[in-house]
């Protein structure tokens, strides 16, 4: 189910600009992909779907390459402004299939968005955590090598992928704390929104500001600081390699969301890099033929070799 009404609207950080090729559109007026350019294609299907809870959204699609294995695995998190009516995990099917064809398995998670009962705080976060931890329990059955693991997330999923890497730092007083979370040592954010406080203060972002309030909930005596266990900068340093892949032409996620987060990661002495891909909007980030995806897959392959 995908609806796009709303979407239509190291120790030091390094910045990497991916070179343009002779085939790239002119940088002054690039022709960008639209959502129908991606979603109107024939949609590939996963090898299996497992449930990690009773809700219809508490599912994971598993994409397994042919062969003996075990295979390196990508933990994949879709975006859609943390809102199920905008997007679900099937938005990632095209890049999941591309990885499967290239001998990389995919653990593509779903979660209850803020528009569903049980979504928001703590449900959306708890769902992402349970879905990630289910990878360990199912790794042997699906020939997944959790020692060669990379988490990637697109848009709002970029926030959740980074959060999954940092949640081991959550204090025991947080309702989101778990004793032995999946260890994630490398995260790739594709046009992500890692800083919830910045997102809530930035009306120019394509998700708007009200959705953040729905995601983190209202302050309570038990949870007075609504960003302490939800916004990624509060968890820095993550002690994980962080690659941010972004395009300056992205009209949904402002480029400053990436540069500002990278600056905060630098201040915390985390290992982070920003990869700026020419002629790249928001859709290109998850289109398998795009230069942005070529760069992302290069990062994945280097991480799991």
Image: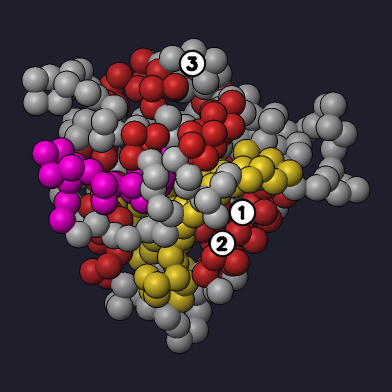
Residue nearest the viewer, comparing 99 with 50: 99
Residue shown at the point (38%, 41%) measured from the top left = 236
Point out the tag, 3 or 2, that comes first from the N-terminus.
3
Dot 3 corresponds to which residue? 202
* Residues under numbered marks 2 and 1 in contact, where contact means CB atoms less than 8 Å apart: yes
What residue is shown at x 40% (from left), y 53% (from top)? 239
Q: Are marks 1 and 3 in contact (CB under 8 Å)?
A: no
Screen quadrant of the C terminus? bottom right
Q: Which residue is drawn at the image coordinates 59% and 67% (left, top)?
A: 301
- Per the rendered image, the range of residues in magenta is 156-179
Residue 296 circle label: 1
Question: Which residue position is annotated with label 2?
Answer: 300
Element type at mark 1: helix
Residue 172: x and y, percent?
A: 13, 44
Q: Taking 54 as reference, is 31 left or right? A: right
What colouring method underlies this structural image?
A: secondary structure
Q: Is residue 204 above or below residue 131?
A: above
Element carrying mark 3: loop
In the rendered structure, does residue 60 fall within the stretch colored magenta? Answer: no
x then y, percent, for residue 265: 48, 39
């Amino acid at each position: 189910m995908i609806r796009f009404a709303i979407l239509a609207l190291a120790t030091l950080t390094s910045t990497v600009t991916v070179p343009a090729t002779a085939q790239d559109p002119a940088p002054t007026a690039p022709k960008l992909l639209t959502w129908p350019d991606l979603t109107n294609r024939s949609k590939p299907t996963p090898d299996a779907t497992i449930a990690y809870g009773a809700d219809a959204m508490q599912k994971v699609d598993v994409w397994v390459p042919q062969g003996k294995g075990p295979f390196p695995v990508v933990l994949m998190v879709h975006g859609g402004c943390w809102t199920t009516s905008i997007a679900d995990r099937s938005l990632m099917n095209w890049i999941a299939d591309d990885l499967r064809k290239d001998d990389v398995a995919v653990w593509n998670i779903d979660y209850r968005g803020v528009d569903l009962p049980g979504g928001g705080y703590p449900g959306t976060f708890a769902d992402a955590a349970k879905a990630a931890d289910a990878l360990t329990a199912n790794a042997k059955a699906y020939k997944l090598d959790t020692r060669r693991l990379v988490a990637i997330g697109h848009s709002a999923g970029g926030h959740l992928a980074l959060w999954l890497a940092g949640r081991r730092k959550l204090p025991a007083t947080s309702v989101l704390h778990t004793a032995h979370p999946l260890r994630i040592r490398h995260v790739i954010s594709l046009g992500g929104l890692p800083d919830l406080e910045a997102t809530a203060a930035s009306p120019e972002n394509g998700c708007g500001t009200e959705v953040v309030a729905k995601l983190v909930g209202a302050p309570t005596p038990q949870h007075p600081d609504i960003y302490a266990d939800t916004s990624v900068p509060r968890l820095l340093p993550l002690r994980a390699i962080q690659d941010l892949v972004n395009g300056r032409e992205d009209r949904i996620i402002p480029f400053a969301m990436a540069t500002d987060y990278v600056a905060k990661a630098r201040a915390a002495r985390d290992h982070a890099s920003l990869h700026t891909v020419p002629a790249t909007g928001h859709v290109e980030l998850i289109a398998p033929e795009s230069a942005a995806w070529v760069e992302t897959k290069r990062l994945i392959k280097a991480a799991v070799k």
